[in-house]
Amino acid sequence: MAVHTAKQALDAAVEAARWAPSVHNTQPWTFVMSEGEIGLRADVDRKLRVSDASGREMLISCGAALFTMRTALRGAGVEPVVRILPDPDRPALLATVRPGAESEPDERTRALCGEIERRRTHRAGFTDLPVPRRLVEALVKDASQEGARLTPIGSPQAVEVVAALTRAAQGVQSGDRRFSLEVIRWGLPPGSARKDGVPAAGYPREPVRTDPHFAQRDYSWRHDWGSEAGQATQAATGVVALLTTPGDSREEWIAAGQALQRVLLHASAYGVSAAFHTQALEAHHLREFLREELCSGEQPQMIMRLGITFEDKDSVRRPLSDLVD
């Protein structure tokens, strides 16, 4: 076994959880260590007040952290015992996790553990290398095992619809000073010492156009920040996919986050990265259109593109001392 005590397993789980993906890399979580278990709490001070007033994206981010903890515990040689939303009187407490029975981690678990710190969000186009169909099919199965549905969009017309909705939402948000200020709060200037947000090397200085074009967040708004690497050669759209859940409860937002991280870690193990587009999901009418027209009535929780890139971006994470009580 990789870890010999319950405390070591819990420490490893929290260390891993801080590497989970989150909207704008806000890292909207804290952890409480007590009586042999971890309490995962939403850090509501990090919620996006303008674009995520309901907290949906915050809870998806926390769900990704929860799956990361589950994976790290399995990698440490114990089965995780999880309770979701265990206390109605404490809505910020999203889950508790404690080590259960000992179990030898299998090859798949070890592979996922190896990607926790290596996985990166991509914010541009991809190379022309195709994502293997068998891998996409496996990712669909991954999501279903966490209570969500991953639907790759095969129709070029449907891909164009999703791209157009993304462009429309980005255009509206770019013209709204409140949205713009919220985004640039998390877009870091070169040389920033902050341990949250998106480093300047992690987003393009100028938009990288794909065909059809999926608009990206303008983290460099009115600044000459960002990276120029790869803009000429990495412009493929990749595989466009929608992550949905049957309903739209807090439990399902957390489930969507767990499904998302399971998909991302599996994809990363095969050299496949993801780019996220949440703009249309932050506009109620556009999200409803997606639900009714492309999601068979299910609730869209994430729009993503999957593809292959050879760029190696840096990422930043807050220290454990800021996260653990």
Image (cartoon, rainbow, N blue to C red):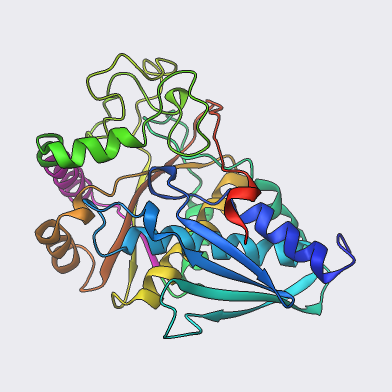
Res 109 visible:
no
Magenta region: which residues? 149-170
Magenta stretch contains residue 224: no
Find residue 306 and report its horizontal and vertical position in percent.
Answer: 42, 44
> Which quarter shows the N terminus?
bottom right
Q: Which residue sits at x=38%, y=48%?
A: 23
Magenta stretch contains residue 156: yes
Find residue 137 and report its horizontal and vertical position in percent.
Answer: 48, 60
> Which quarter shows the C terminus?
bottom right
Q: Residue 12, located in which quarter of the rendered image?
A: bottom right
Q: Residue 153, located in which quarter of the rendered image?
A: bottom left
Along the line of sight, which residue is nearer the eye, 70 or 230?
A: 70
Find residue 263 and report its horizontal and vertical position in percent.
Answer: 51, 57
Q: Main secondary structure of the magenta part?
A: helix
Q: Which residue sits at x=56%, y=41%?
A: 317
Q: Is residue 270 above or below residue 145?
A: above
Please give left or right for residue 97 compared with residue 1 in the image: left
Find residue 109 and report its horizontal and vertical position in percent.
Answer: 71, 61
